[in-house]
Image (spheres, rainbow, N blue to C red):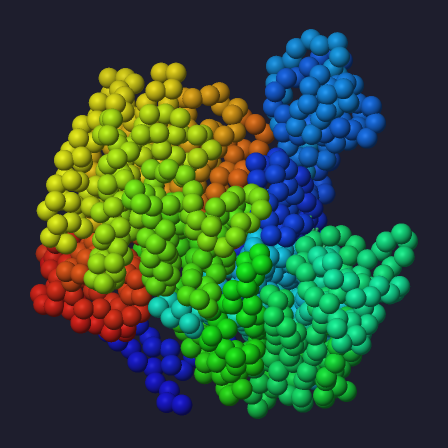
Amino acid sequence: MLCVRLILLTSFLIPLINCQTIYELLNSFRFLNEGSISKSDIYEYQYEYVMYTEPENVTRERFAWVEEIARPYLYQRDPTKPLQCDSNPLLSATDLPGADFLSIIPSSADPSLCHTLCCNYMSCAAWSYAASSPVDFNDCKKGQPCCYLKTYVPKSLDNPNIISAIMNRTFPYNHPPTGLRSAVPLGGITTGSIELRGDGTFHEWTVESQSPASGAKYGVVGDALLAIRLKNLQTNETDSRLIRTHPHHDLQGIDTIRYHGSYPVSKLELIDYTLIANMDLYAYSILKPGDLNRSMTPAIIFSLNIHNPNDYPISIDFMYNAPLSVQIDQIRLSKNILQQIASDTYIQCISLCDQNSLCASWNWQNMNNQSTCILYSDIGNNVHLNGHVSGIRGQWTYDKSGPLVLDRPGHMPSNGQYVLWPFLSSDQTMTATVDNNINNILSNFSAYGGWYQQTEIKGTGANGAVSISTILQPGEKKTLSILFAWYFPHHNWLDLPLDNYYSLLFNNVTTVGQSIGIDKDDNQLKLILKDILTLHNVYFNSSLPNYLVDSLINSASHMRSAMYFSNGDWRQWEAYDCNDVDSVHNDHQRHIPYILYFPETEKNKMYTWAKYQQADGMIQETFTVGCMGDTVPYDQHGGRNMGDVTTIFILETLELYRWTNDFNFLKDMYPHVVAGIQWQLSVSTEFGLPEHLECTYDIPNMSQYPTTTFNSFMHLAALRACMELALIMNDTNTYNQCYEPFIRANKQINQLLWYNDTIDTGYFLAYTGGAGEKAIFTDALYGQVLAFTYGLGPLYNISIMKKHLESEVRLADTPYGLRMLTGREPLTNPQDNSIWMGASQDWSVLNLWFNMDPDSALIQSEKGLNLVRQTLNDQWNVHGLYAADGYGIGGKPWVTSHYGFHMVLWHLPFALSGQYTDLAKGILLFSPKLRSPFILPVLIPNIFGTISSTPLLNGQSTYTFTLTIGKLSLNTLAINNAKYPSTVNLIAGQSIQWSG
Ligand SMILES: *[C@@H]1O[C@H](CO)[C@@H](O)[C@H](O)[C@H]1NC(C)=O
Ligand SMILES: *[C@@H]1O[C@H](CO)[C@@H](O)[C@H](O)[C@H]1NC(C)=O
């Protein structure tokens, strides 16, 4: 291969990375988060009060992955601090009314049971006990005993029938390090994913097309494991380790693992002074913006970077074991029983199923003191159930060197293939094994560094494992890589079979490996790494603050739940725990990385929303209705009357048109925009503002009020977008239809919603009506956020909007972010009081556009994101809502997991660079909020780059525009009004420079 190191001289240096080794490329990944997990650490789940979140262990099929009221959250126990949970003082004949989160019938009429229950929940601050409940309440029944558990201590009342206690508790629990509560989800886009956590365990498996429309994810797969064996070739001493901090088998673990994540890459540094080599484990998948097909590769690659720092040679063996033929604590829900056979071990079920040609799946369980294998003629959905073990009929094959394949023929979602396949080169060798007993696998690995006796495999077995080995001379650095790929073409939506789109790209799992050249050399692997580095560098090589770079890179992991079917439909849940599909408003909160990386997916949804538009012009809220319950049939579209659905559809039409210069798309959407405007105006007749509509902030039930500021600003933004679109379409009639109402809405907002609470301060009221209270709602100006990013400019008087933002902080700030609604109910109401992840981001976006100095403007954004990044250390499971203080769980997750609300943070880079994009006219302008010198990302669908500025002595600046991904043609390019002197035609890797 030609090996050149080119240095391009622009304002900074760009070394081209043609000659870098895999080792060097991996080593150049950057991370802005880390968590150190040590073998002596104690980690335990504690139960906490929530409204609803997604559990690790899902117990229902065809149902939202949801748990209400209480859920386990992982903590690190501090063994030096006492654990105390006393009911002290005990208050006889006293009631503590209110603050209830759980009410449970105790197993007997004994108040001490309330004490025990209370101590089980970290959120329990007090309890009351009634020997005979006066009424049905939560899980308690009138006339039966009841324990009422409370999140805080309410005011006491005398009551002869009730005993209460205030808890005197200590909590020797800290938030665990980054990488344990969640980690980067690995796997191609729409192919399902797996998290490798910082202790070396594998969680959250959805690769067998699991979703709320079928079976449950595998919450944790204990025996999926990576291990190493090092040998000093001078002394022949060997040292075998599981890559775990808390190993659950005979092999020793690693002292400390330091976890880092930059989606789609996880890095685990193995820190242990007793190891004779320096090792970093990388686990990653393919992500290439602008290339959806490539990014839909159903695979994870494990690469171990090894450095031999000694003056003697060493050998290393690296292995991966996957227990793919047994699912521990999972039951298969089937009624089609072929045979029931008494059997002491679940392992026997594998061969019993194999011997019965009609057997498709099996389940092992202990019933009536008898363990039984039940063989089924079909494959039911799996759900979590302790003590049950199940599996799917399957066969492993392996032939000398190459892939170890597990084949599960059939047409159900769990039918498909897995492969374990080391990347070999002339100095590396591999072995493979299939074994029912993980301890055999590990002891042979430990003894020989592989399984040299098995050169050909064809058969069944619980575990499949592969190893790869090499020798390192003193000082040498090498990388050992293993591919873990899958091919599960089938995807069921309840009873409707829908194939995964990726089944059109690959014929089987072997072609997945071949598509990345595993059977040739490591050139494709280098490309995979370079593609990720190129994307990461758009953010890393910029002046954006670290917290934001980290959040931009890792929030894209939200794509984990996207689905793409061979019928051409792109679909995504609101969340696994809220199982509606692609509600327009929730999609819009998260959509910017999607529209940038894979814009066709967002257009795909726009066509579907347009298709389901009602006759009256209203765009329907979702493709599939539902939340927290049964999953309904595919594309059973519907929803509520919303202030942020039809409006957003109109705004997104403009956004996509300007950002992708796709006139056919605009032509297709325009009739739907015009119809949407008719509907929008029809619900705004009385005040000239939208009336009694719901919005994405639905828990406070804002549709009860005549109008809200949130919906009114969405109205303004949509009318402005309508005017732009009508101009493009030469449609004067529609232009006028939107212009007049825009002017009227502006006046009406001023009259009905603006409130001066003092001579100097004021804010927009959350809503009109109510009991006349003057509530403030944060994120009320979201419509303005969208208007700025899509180039519509200010919708309203700027100094008034700034006053409102000042009041949001003055009246609604909390240590965790901006409280949603203030002034309606007491602070102990966990609904109004909660922190929805959008408000703090949008506050910062608007203040940047209003030219507040960037450090001050970013305060709220940083606080909101760092709560999750740095306090909870749970960046790959950002919730939609967090709790505020006042009811016992301040700063903790409150509602809905793996959510996209915080992803409005993607408006920040646009605000920081002041990017204005109109590719239809060939215009790209920037008005950066940072003073020169700076480097900022350029973000356009399929097109990425940077702008930079260095100051010149004469007060002017030198500007550089560099394209790193895609190609770009422009008529006008300007930064700070300094125009590039000619038209622009760039391909990736090129830069232009000018001054002004
Ligand atoms: C989920 O189930 C597994 C056993 O299959 C258990 O080890 C794990 O602790 C459970 N997770 C939670 C959060 O309870
Ligand atoms: C709570 O427990 C601590 C430690 O045992 C004790 O010192 C303190 O007095 C207790 N507080 C009350 C209100 O009983």
Q: Residue at x 33, y 37 (%)?
A: 643
Q: Position of residue 888 (x, y in %)?
A: 59, 29
Please state which of residues 436 and 390 is positioned toward the viewer in this rendering.
390
**Left-right relation of 847 to 118:** left
The quarter holding residue 952 reads bottom left
Q: Quadrant of the N terminus?
A: bottom left
**Left-right relation of 803 to 587:** left
Numbered circles on residues, count:
0
Q: Position of residue 398 (x, y in %)?
A: 67, 84
Please state which of residues 862 and 239 is positioned toward the viewer in this rendering.
862
Q: Residue at x 86, y 53 (%)?
A: 367
Q: Quadrant of the C terminus?
A: bottom left
Residue 85 seen in the figure: no
The quarter holding residue 322 reads bottom right
Residue 343 versus residue 768 in the image, above or below? below
**Left-right relation of 663 to 771:** left
Which residue sits furthest front? Answer: 615
Q: Position of residue 9 (x, y in %)?
A: 24, 74
Q: Residue at x 37, y 89 (%)?
A: 2
Please state which of residues 984 and 111 is positioned toward the viewer in this rendering.
111
Residue 772 versus residue 64 in the image, above or below? above
